Amino acid sequence: MSGSDQPSLDEIEAWFAGVVEGRVSRDAADRWAGRWYGDDELDWDDVSRWALGLLCGIDLRPGPGEPYLHDDEQVRGWLEELRRRRAG
């Protein structure tokens, strides 16, 4: 799930699924999304930009040792919403 070409919505969804399934750390997903989200030269569709914005910051905590700002249930909800938006 990496490379130099702009990721597709399939790849963005795969990162979300990886976090939900515990195969990808929140920190890794945040770093990956931040690399793409911050690239102003790329042209994103609305769903991709929305999803990247959620992944970028998925590891935020209110303080050291605190739980994530967005719990696992909320992240699962985001993945479900992404899939709904993709279906149109």
Image (cartoon, rainbow, N blue to C red):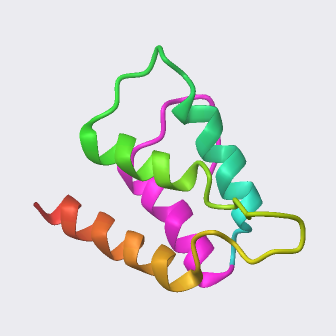
Side (left or right) of 26 relative to 63: left
Res 28 → quadrant: bottom right
Side (left or right) of 38 relative to 84: right
Q: Which residue is drawn at the image coordinates 69% and 59% (left, top)?
A: 60
**The magenta stretch spans residue 81:** no
Q: Nearer the viewer, residue 9 or 70?
A: 70
The residue furthest front is 62
The residue furthest top is 41
Q: Which residue is drawn at the image coordinates 34% and 31% (left, top)?
A: 44
Is 59 rendered above or below residue 72? above
**The magenta stretch spans residue 8:** yes
Is 71 rendered above or below residue 87? below
Q: Which residue is drawn at the image coordinates 71% and 46% (left, top)?
A: 31
Is 72 rendered above or below residue 3? below
Number of numbered discs overlaid on the protein picture: 0
Res 33 → quadrant: top right
Where's residue 29, x and y in %?
Answer: 66, 56
Q: Which residue is drawn at the image coordinates 29% and 70% (left, top)?
A: 81
Where's residue 2, x and y in %?
Answer: 65, 44
Where's residue 48, x and y in %?
Answer: 35, 45
The residue furthest right is 64
Residue numbers of the magenta segment? 1-22
Where's residue 40, x and y in %?
Answer: 49, 17
Q: Nearer the viewer, residue 67 or 47?
A: 67
Side (left or right) of 72 relative to 67: left
Q: Nearer the viewer, residue 50 or 18?
A: 50
For the C terminus, the image quarter is bottom left
Side (left or right) of 58 relative to 60: left
